[in-house]
Image (cartoon, grey):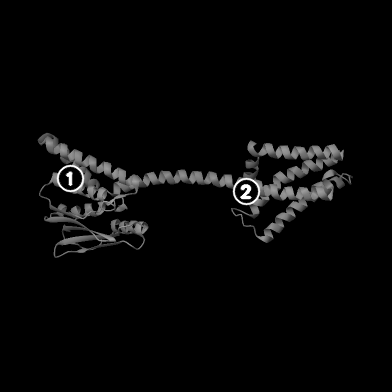
Amino acid sequence: MFSLAVATWRALSEPKRAFPIALCCGTMALLEFRYGQSIPGLVSAIGLCLAFVGIAPFAWRALFPGSIVAKPARLLFYLGIAVASVIGFSKALPMAFGVRHTMLGYPSSILVSVALFLVGGWGLGRDVDMELRLVEESARAERLGREAENAQLLALRNHLDPHFLFNTLNAIAEWCRQDGEVAERAVLRLSALLRSMLEGVKSGEWSLVRELGLVRDLFELHLIRDPEMFKLEWSVDDVADVQVPALLLLSLAENAVKHGPARGDRGQLSVRVVRDSSVVTITIENPGRYNGPRPGSDGVPTLQKRLHVAYGGRASFDIDSAGINRTRATLRLPVSAK
């Protein structure tokens, strides 16, 4: 509570609030001295102003934190604080000095002072609250921006197997000595792959055509390194108008190579995209036995969470065996977004 009071008084001391407060309070004190013609009356006016500045905004913030809906009991308590403060300084204090009549002590003046106390405390208290919340939200937005940037970098790292990247770079270094044309092709393909990934991380959503282009770049890069690793079958319907979360298929494409051809299971790797009126079915099938979910792997759970965020319950993902020694991953996505 003390920290709330200190924060309130500090905010009230800022020039943008202190100047109008001083102008109002100075005018009230001047009028009391001009028409009351007594030092005790002036002291009571100054005391009333100090009570208003020190009590009213703090009382409002303490009684109604972060809410514009005021409970009746608290409103009555706030009203009691206002009445006690005004009567105490406009009537009781002058009488303690032997002064029975002051300008601020008249009933009409007391009513005006109570109203000013209530409205001023409400206005200043809410103004301070809103400003402090704005500062907190700005700091939160800045923090979230940094976290989003870190998340983008993390997503980029998670969407590209570092072993594959290092092996490709080592292969390119070897090709530079043996076959400059192959090295150039590999560099251009890798550059296109990384550029597309960076765009995907920033955009969040793009066309399925671009997503499939990224997948194909990945497969072609593998085939540059080892043309006999697998045979690529590619069958895609017209999906030019379909939007998907960026980098949605990349981890599936990586796994299709990593847990199949890269482990020695050579054969045909196929990508099929079939579209009907409302659903796009994407199937990636690779050689290699499916042994169920791998302990500690977060690839499939992350994919399922992304599908839920993007499509609710309208999308599905399955991965299972396709024959004796093949694995099939199937995505079913609605043509229209959520």
> Label 1, on which residue?
221
First in sequence: mark 1 or mark 2?
2
- The location of residue 43, given as percent across then percent down, is 81, 40
In the depicted view, which residue is nearer to us: 189 or 135?
189
In the depicted view, which residue is nearer to us: 130 or 302?
130
* Disc 1 crowd, CA 10 A, few/some/many (<14, 14-19, 20+): many
Residue 54, disc: none
Judged from the image, the secondary structure of the residue bearing numbered disc 2 is helix
- The location of residue 27, given as percent across then percent down, is 76, 38
In the depicted view, which residue is nearer to us: 239 or 29?
239
Q: Is residue 231 left or right of residue 215?
A: left
* Disc 2 crowd, CA 10 A, few/some/many (<14, 14-19, 20+): many
For residue 63, what is the image quadrant?
A: bottom right
- The location of residue 130, given as percent across then percent down, is 58, 47
Residue 126, disc: 2
Q: Is residue 130 left or right of residue 190?
A: right
Q: Amino acid at mark 2?
A: Arg
Q: Amino acid at mark 1?
A: Leu
- The location of residue 86, given as percent across then percent down, is 78, 49
Say if 40 sits above or below 332 in the image: above
Residue at 77 percent across and 44 percent down: it is 48
